[in-house]
Amino acid sequence: MTTREKLTEIATNLWWSWNPEALDLFRRLNPGAFDASDHNPVAALRHADPAVLEDTDFQQAVDVVYDTFARYLNAPPHVTDAPRVAYFCMEYGLHESLPFYSGGLGILAGDHTKAASDLGLPLTAVGLFLRDGYFKQFFDVQGRQRAEFPGVDTTELPLQLVTDAHGNPVTVTVPTGWQVLHLRAWRLALGRINLYLLDTDFSANPFTLRFLTRRLYQGDRTTRIQQEIILGIGGIRMLRALGVEVDVYHLNEGHCAFLTLELLREALAEGRPRHDAETAVRERCVFTTHTPVKAGHDRFDPGLFLEQMRGFQQQIGLSDHDLLAYGRINPNDTTEAFTMTVLGLKLSRKANGVSKLNGEVARRQWHALYPDRPVDEVPISHVTNGVHLPTWTAPHARPFLRIHLGDDWLERRDDPAVWKKIQDIPDEALWAYRRMLRERLIHYIQERIRYQTLPQTAVLDPDVLTIGFARRFATYKRATLFFLDRERALDFFRNTDRPIQMIYAGKAHPDDEGGKALIREIYEMTKHPEVRGKLVFVEGYDMAVGRMLTSGCDVWLNNPRRPYEASGTSGQKVAVHGGLNLSILDGWWPEGYDGTNGWAIGREASHLYKDPQVQDPEDAHFLYQTLEQEVLPAFYERDERGLPPAWIARMRRAMERLPYAFSAHRMVIDYVEQIYRTPATQDVPR
């Protein structure tokens, strides 16, 4: 096999996205093409420098990486006799060159599928081919977020159109209203598993329907329900056309819950009585709910639902009342909307939230479905989210971790004994590790903002406490909480003895005027003479920016309104880099925080449901107080060696305790043992 052939095999499997040695090969092929394509190996290989391909040292490096890749594909599974799983999600955050995600849900789905590949699980994933992605973010000179949808070139992505034995595209049909919609699929090899992305943008469909799968979370309610019909009903039909055998269907959030109705249609078509058909569906479906806010769950007006489901309704043979009942808490309330989460709960055997607190919130939220039992007995459990460490561990952090944790630290990342070795690392080495990562981040930021449309300067200092905030700019995440009391916030920047610097990044949905206003507010603060250069907003937030910030920041700030953070995995990425969380006790942090491995903003849950006019000032006060009294002293109080012993002690505790406990490796094993393998129960909603 030639060097180019080996590189082609690697480039067309997303295994490279969590293997820096592989990515480095493609960077060497053509650095300009690699960077311009958002680090896309297919593009770099297409524009490869022939001299590099012919270089003997480069060819030897390719051989080493290819052998590692082959061993990975052929390794025995870590979990034996696992059920065959079909994993459905609306979005997947896999890599910055594949913009098929908007935020935490997609990042979770990407990490889940990558961890499933690492474990060798028989899992197949299903999503939408979002040809225009979510959007690329840029700003005008007033700091207003703008969105562009450049579209993707399928010839420069690691995608393959799914075809039959004769080379013809495999297609299936789904009804939207009375129209018949044709679907094809693109296959994305993700290590040892396949992700199938459903596509309507081809000539078999009327022009008005071709663009249904192009954009994520865009358009009106009709577009949204049509996308969810495509994902749920079309996804099942595509798996049938491909001959994929499935034991368990995992519904990751309500967007894909229509798959349960398609399974019900199949069971009824086999001649089963309706009760038996429903039982058969429940035995094969499990459902993960994320959204802690009732308004955040997909609801469809009964008229719109029936209009768009008419063709399917004719196929399944159910009355309006009976079909609507699957998505209603009260089936006899003719005004109640059809709710996708209710559908998922009613036709699944297991349901879970994504953190312990999120599970508690979900049980309260959906208690009305189980009126005859106490809230604590509502059958919604939890599996706390985790992050895929190979994806999120910075390449320049790995040599340090290999030296101190062992060459096999990634293979043994769920073993607490590996992380106990953190205690043996000298203080000087840990502090040098933290400074190196901070310095790399600062260099990255200073280079990046030179090309931004926002006119900013950066005079960031590699020896100053660096605070990071990067996430989706939903208003409940309160991106501007730090600046609620502007004078008190400015005092932190004025302090020359214990200075701070802050780096922000994040997107607001194009239709979220509140989120976009928060971005403008932070941008206006960057121009304040007392913070100029010390406060930076990074344009074009994506996974690459996220990786840099989570690896380089000393403090990861997270201050949502509790309990609206379902899990919040960004903070789970910092600990392996020696970063520390400063967070509201929401999402995963109540399970991670032990008083010695980071900081909590407020330690009481008494403000759980306070009015924002009360809660926000209280939480801002807690934030300022914790920074003044705990964070800054820990960072700047040095011993005779010039080291901060209190800070290093917290670093040790975070690095020892958090990475293995909040890894996707652990999370997926929990799903196998607690959700996928667990038999059906009699906990059927009314």
Image (cartoon, helix red, strand yellow):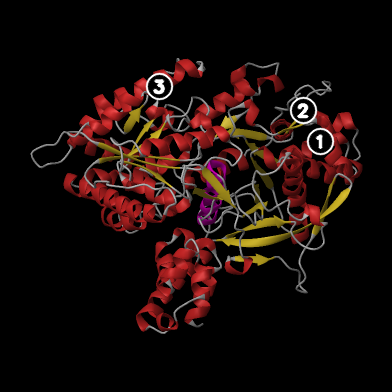
Q: Which is nearer the eye, 666 or 261?
A: 261
Give the spatial CA distance, label 2 vs label 1. Answer: 9 Å
Which amino acid is tagged 1?
Phe
Question: In the image, 326: left or right of 41?
Answer: right
Quadrant of res 510: top right
Instruction: Tell me which residue sits at (55%, 24%) in the image.
Output: 360
Above or below, 41 against 172 in this view is: below
Residue highlighted by disc 1:
305
Res 294 quadrant in image:
top right
Residue 316 placed where, x, y %?
Answer: 88, 42
Q: Earlier in the sequence, mark 2 or mark 3?
A: 2
Q: Quadrant of the C terminus?
A: top right
Q: Amino acid at mark 2?
A: Ala
Q: Quadrant of residue 365?
A: top right
Identify the residue under disc 2.
337
Disc 3, SS: helix
- Between discs 1 and 3, the one toward the N terminus: 1
| Residues tagged 2 and 3 counted as in contact (Cβ below 8 A) | no
Pick whichever, 249 or 643, lies toward us: 643
* 2 or 1: tag closer to the N-terminus: 1
The magenta segment is 103-119
Mark 3 closeness class: few <14, some 14–19, many ≥20 residues within 10 Å:
many
Say which element carries label 1.
helix
Mark 3 sits on what residue? Answer: 619
Check disc 1: other Cα within 10 Å, few if <14, some if 14-19, many if 20+.
many
Label drawn at residue 502: none
Magenta: main secondary structure? helix
Q: Is residue 560 above or below residue 454?
A: above
SS at badge 2? loop
Distance from the alpha carbon under mark 1 to that under mark 3:
41 Å
